[in-house]
Image (tube, coloured by chain):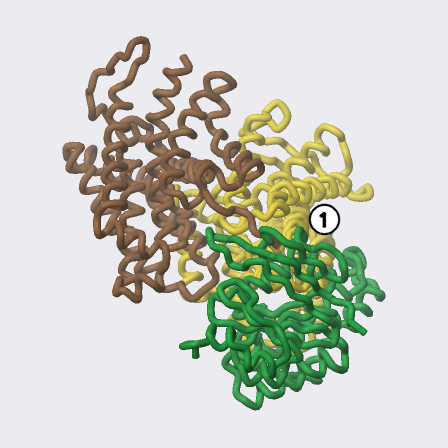
Chain colours: A green, B yellow, C brown
Amino acid sequence: MTPVPLLALADVSVDFAGLRALTRVSLEAVRGQVKAVIGPNGAGKTTLFNVISGYVPATSGAIRFLGQDIHNLTPHQIAAMGVRRTFQNGGLFGEMTALENVLAGFHAQIKSGFAGLLFGTRAAREAEREALHRARRLLDLMEIGHVADQPAKDLSGGQQRMVEIVRALATDPPLLLLDEPAVGLAPPVRDRLMEIMRRLAGEHGLGILVIEHAIDLVMKGSDVIVVLNSGEKIAEGKPEEIRRNRDVLEAYLGYG
Amino acid sequence: MRDRRLFYVVPLLALLVPAFTNPYTQFVVNLMLVYILVTVGFNIVMGYLGQLAFANTAFFGIGAYTTALVMVYAKLPFLLALVLGAAAGALAGFLASVTALRGIRLYYLAIITLAFGELMRWVYIHADQVTRGTDGLPVPVASVFGFALDSEMRKYYVFLAIVVLVVKGTSNLLRSRVGRAIVAIRDNEFATASLGIPTAQYIVLAFVWSGFIVGIAGGMFAILIGRVVPESFGLIELIVQFAMVMVGGLGSLAGGVIGAVALTALPEYFRRFPGLEEMFFGALLVLILLFLPKGLVSFFARYLPVFREPLYRE
Amino acid sequence: MFLQLVVSGISQGAIYALVALSLTLVYRATTIVNFGHGDFVMAGAFVVYVFVILAGMPFLPAALLAFALLFALGLAIQRGFIEPIKAGPHIGFAMMSIALGYVLRGVARAGWGREVLPMPRVFDFPPIFLGELVVTGESLVIVGVVAVLLAVFFVVFYRTRTGKMIQAVYQSERGAALVGINVRRFHCIMWGFGVALGAVGGVLVAPFTLLHPDLGASFLIRGFAAMTLGGFGSLWGAVAGGLLLGIAEQQLGAYVSTKLIDIAAYLVIIAVLVVRPVGLFGRVAAVRV
């Protein structure tokens, strides 16, 4: 039985600043699957995430999420449909505490109108309290509850990464895009990150696309690997297949 | 000193203030109440939203003129006139920020608020058939539910009630998803959008809310001073308001109150000597930026945790 | 009459172009918009006034001295007030520049009271007649000087090593630092130049305008209008915007109402940002969120 694709890109090309950043890339993301996107620097990986999440317009091709055409939508509209992402650097709200960051993630789920919040009605306060409770629990679950009240900019790199992921997960998004989540993390933290990714996909059925440079993480943690080079997809397959792929080895020749 | 309920004590104590004042000092206290709202409103856009904006004096003036005009020409009672002044301020907030819906940000947005503010002042001066231009529009004595506000003390209690309500409402909003969204936009608009939050709408909301509050302040100002002149909303007023926000503390409600209370009485002293007001407030702002950029409230917050303002309610 | 207005518009617009160009220079070099810039322009005018009227200097040396003085002021401001707050929020820079502008304005007002100061005739060039058009001596001087300055500026910018260095830092500060350019010193010097260049605008209008401390505000808004019209951040756009604004003001003033001259700049800003935010030569103005 073929799983229904959450996300489907068909022949997507992206031009900006006079460069062709992506050339006719097609790929799918599927529920319960961790798909890694790898490739040398400048291969177009972050551009891929940017065009999926709406920050960069696709010059041609089709992008569908849950069957709907999203290529013309703005980032917040796409996010509202259920796509969440993390950013390569500086995705957190530095002046807000870790708890407040995660609470921001719950925004859409706090069912209270402007008037209710303004007058402090009981219903509004209940909705807010509920979100506060869930945010705290989520932070505790990820074992960073102890830094909940610290400003995000004062946290360590690993903690910041975790907060950003927790914030992205707040609303149980069907699709999660992680942009180099493991960069600069110590090995035990990276392992935990991988474990979390696998559980989110396997147990909670999220579709996860992750950009990563750490090959070991990618080999162990992902179900499928997509390889980009110079804006083109040059290979896709299971980790063992990719490991043996001639084109991939060539792309990485001299690299890292 | 962790309990926020301490803040409820302040308005109660404030009820006793008139026992210690004479009409002149009471006038100054009333002016402080007006400026508390001005600074709180300004802080929403500059401190919480983090957007440089020059429209605050425009909101102030629009609120003042609207309230005064409907009292003079339509003979409306004060509270109704005040609501209209607030609505006009809110509309001004919308107009000043509407380009944000098309993606305009940062310096462009700052410049358009500057143009808007100065344009409004030109209107006050040149629509002189209606506004009496630079001579000023005299404002009739206000009355509330039959009581004439003909003494500073009476104005005080009405103002106090208004300020407490507005500040409480603002506090509620800031400690909810609305406040968090606005601060999130300040810290990182792209990440905020990635959470499904329609950032442009919240930017406009912040400006509308700010315009509403400052519009109320303008209406209060009109009946306090008794005459509305364009000069009250010009460039000197702008630097005074900037100084109040920065001295108190950007991004803090308590900071807004502190800044207003600290600086309201000062401009009077400088008015006699040409240039002194600009030099003083300009220099004050420079010093604050160099040495205490987070304002007086940051100083208090270090020792009194009750001054730290989380963006949620416990 | 239309052409006559264009002529006087170009003369006005030349000053606006200078103000806008100097604003843009500082913005491109340091990503900071100097909201006090108008007051530095005013300072240029006042300094020249002091030297000519109170110290009795002839105009040209006074102008050069004013340029040097304002250059030094720009350096001092960058070092003393801008550099130290680098770590803070970006709106801090704007606030600092505003505050400094107000201090300058206060000093000017304190020094000269509530009066408006006229400067006696310094130039006495006869007007020239091109067919039916009259080009006043004033216009000739202003447009002439500005044209020369712009020519020098763009030649330096595009043809000399200094210019290439400026371009390099514009494009990438990190890259420039890597090839050995001292970026901090660059910021400092650019502030000096930006302020001094803007002050030249003040120096040029001083002989022809009634001087008062609030001159700065009107220069600032015209500078912004010119930048917005020409495309925020574009050097050529600043010049084009300034000239067009000058012409537009004169046309509006004559054909519609003189009251509009004061607010033409505001209307231009609002119109451009609503209809076509990138202006004539600018790039992306709107964010996609």
Mark 1 element type: helix
Q: Is residue C238 visible?
A: yes
Q: Residue furthest front?
A: A246
Q: Is residue B147 above or below residue A17?
A: above
Reply above or below: C113 against B207: above
Provide residue A246's location: percent of width, then percent of height.
Answer: 51, 76
Horizontal side of A16 relative to B77 (left or right) equals left
Residue placed at 30% from the left, 36% from the top? Answer: C202
Q: Which residue is mark 1?
A: B154
Which class describes the residues within 10 Å of circle 1: few (<14), some (14-19), or many (20+)? some
Would you say residue C221 is visible in this rendering? no
Q: Measured from the top left, where is residue A27 in percent x and y?
A: 65, 65
Position of the C terminus of chain A, as image quadrant, is bottom left
For the N terminus of chain A, the image quarter is bottom right
> Of A51 and C241, which appears nearest the observer?
A51
Residue B303 picture location, percent across and down: 55, 77
- Kindly indicate the quadrant of the structure image that contains residue C156: top left
Pick the front one: C268 or B132: C268
Name the foreground residue: A208 vs A29. A29
Q: Quadrant of residue A192?
A: bottom right
Q: Is residue C169 above or below residue B299?
A: above
